[in-house]
Image: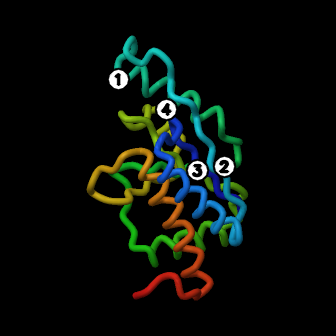
Amino acid sequence: MNIKLIAIGKTDNKSLQTLIDDYTKRLSFYIKFDLEIIPDIKNVKNLSESQQKEKEGELILSKLAPTDQLILLDENGKNFSSVGFSEELQKKMNSGIKTLVFVIGGPYGFSDTVYSKAQGKISLSLMTFSHQMVRLFFIEQLYRGFTILRNEPYHHQ
């Protein structure tokens, strides 16, 4: 199985980017992982919230293959413990999915079209984090999930 994380807008904080790169490299020892950045939409001041979500949604959906399974990182999604998330990853791998795609939306979330194509939603927290920090937190949780599945000493109960 491959895992892809799609996110809107680049990370302009060099410290966060260094950590994202570190965990991406660590993750590559367990699974093929890609982080795909969709550039920020230009002239968003001229767009309504729903227009911005629609434009971002079109860009997100254009990155998907028909066989990809789409999971949205969404505040209204299912909450997992780290162990529970690792078990969910194992189920996905056992089910024969070729590519599992997670998406971090733009500042207003996702369009209805993206929601309708998704096979699930995950919430990282009831708190709100910057989109840049969510990338780091999510990639670290992927890494943690694989170390849990391999019984490696990274995660402590």
Number of residues whose C-alpha sits closer than 10 Å to that of mark 2, classed few (under 14), some (14–19) or many (20 or more): some
Which residue is disc 4 drawn over?
113
Name which of mark 1 and mark 2 comes first in the sequence.
1
Name which of mark 1 and mark 4 comes first in the sequence.
1
Name which of mark 4 and mark 3 comes first in the sequence.
3
Q: Nearer the viewer, mark 4 or mark 3?
A: 3
Q: Amino acid at mark 3?
A: Leu
Q: CA distance from mark 1 to mark 4?
A: 15 Å
In this rendering, is residue 139 above or below 143?
above
The residue sitting at 48% across, 53% down in the picture is 15
Which residue is disc 3 drawn over?
5
Q: Amino acid at mark 4?
A: Thr
Q: Nearer the viewer, mark 1 or mark 4?
A: 1
Quarter of the image with the N terminus in it: bottom right
Number of residues whose C-alpha sits closer than 10 Å to that of mark 3, classed few (under 14), some (14–19) or many (20 or more): many
Q: CA distance from mark 3 to mark 1?
A: 23 Å
Contact (CB < 8 A) between labels 3 and 1?
no
Number of residues whose C-alpha sits closer than 10 Å to that of mark 4, classed few (under 14), some (14–19) or many (20 or more): few
The disc at residue 68 is: 2
Q: CA distance from mark 1 to mark 2?
A: 27 Å
Q: Nearer the viewer, mark 1 or mark 2?
A: 1
Which residue is disc 1 drawn over?
49
Kindly give the residue lying farthest to the top in the view shown: 46
How many numbered circles are shown? 4
Where's residue 150, x and y in %? 62, 84
Q: Left or right of 2: which side holds 39?
A: left
Q: CA distance from mark 2 to mark 3?
A: 12 Å
Q: Left or right of 94: which side holds 143?
A: left
